[in-house]
Amino acid sequence: MGCIEKLNYEVIDKHVSFKEAATFIDKNCAEVYEVKPGFKIFDKGMIGIPPVRIGLDGDVVTFPFTKPCYGTFLLRVSDAVEADMIRRKAKNIRH
Amino acid sequence: MSETKLIPTKPDTALILLGCPQVPIQTSAALYLSGILNKKDVDVTIGGTKAARSLIQIADIDGIYTGGPGGIQDLDAVIDKMADGTFDADVSFVFVHNEAGVAYTATLQALSSGTIIAVVFGGETEARMNELTEIGCPAVTAKGSHNPLPLKRKIDEVVSWDA
C-alpha cells in the first residue's frame, strides 16, 4: 500500500486525543487491537501516545493518524490485506 | 543548587525532530542547537516535514550548522527507520508546540533506546508540559513564538554535559 493520504479513507473525527481515539474504537469496533507506536500500518509507522488502538470490522480498519501541523485524525479504510496483517501481528484486546 | 543533568555525558549522535514549522522560533532554535552539537562533535541528524526542512535548508544553504553526517531527512522516513531498527540516536530532541508534537515524542520514547528530551515552545507551553509529564518525558521549555533567546538559554543548559 502507498501513503495514507492516497488511500480511499473516511475521516470519522479530527483533532482527537489518543484517549478519545481509543475510546471510540473500544465502543464502536468489533475487534480491538493494541500496538506500540511505530507499528507499521499502510507502510507507515504509527505515531501515538500509548495505548494506540486499532479497530477492525471485517475488512474495515479504524485507526488514529497524526499529522504534525493538523493533529490527530480518526480514519477508516477498507483493506482486507491490512486487516489480515493487523490480526496476525497486533495484540488482540477484544475479539 | 545541584540538578541532575538531562544529558550527563557527551553523546555521539543526536536527532533533532522538528514539529510543524508554523511557530517562528523553531527554525532558529533548531539551527542553533544543530550548530552547538556540531561544535561539540556530536553527529546530528535532523528530521522534519518538507516545509520544516526547507526552512532549515534555505537558511543554512552551505550546511554550516546542519551539515552533520546524518543530514536532513524526511520526518516519516526517520520514524520508519527507527521502527525498523536501522536508525537510532544517543539523544533525541523533539520540538513540541502542539499536541502532535507530544505524540511524536511518545513515539520516539517507544522506539529509541536513547534519551528523549522535548523542547517546548509556543503559546501553550503549560498544556504541552502537562501532557509531557503524563508520558514521563523530560523537557525544557520557554513560552513564546518569536523571541528565540529564552529557548536558546534553556538549550544551553541541556547541552552542557560533563567532559
Image (tube, rainbow, N blue to C red):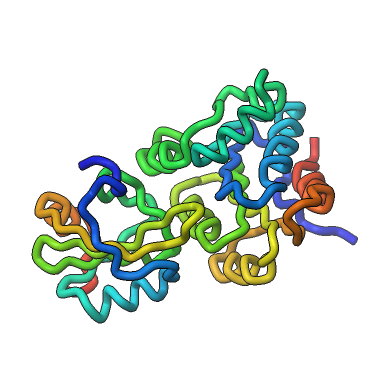
In the image, A67 versus B44, the foreground residue is A67
Q: Position of residue B156 (x, y in %)?
A: 81, 44
Query: Residue B62 appears in which quarter of the rendering?
Result: top right
B54 relative position to B121: left or right: left
Q: Residue at x 34, y 62 (%)?
A: A64
Residue B42 in picture, x, y percent from top left: 67, 30
Of B58 and B76, the residue lying toward us: B58
Which x, y percent locates residue B41? 71, 26
Q: Quadrant of the N terminus of chain B?
A: bottom right
Q: Which residue is depicted at the point 31% across and 66% down?
A: A53
Q: Is residue B52 above or below residue B104?
A: above
Q: Quadrant of the C terminus of chain B?
A: top right
The residue at the point 80 percent across, 46 percent down is B152
Residue A38 % position (x, y): 37, 50
Q: What residue occupies the far bottom of the structure in this picture?
A: A27
In the image, B109: left or right of B154? left
Say how many tags the image has. 0
As rendered, which of A58 and B159 lies closer to the eye?
A58
Residue furthest to the right in view is B1
The image quarter containing residue B132 is bottom right
Q: Is residue A19 left or right of residue A10?
A: right
Residue ID at (24%, 64%): A62
Q: Does B136 appear above or below B64? A: below
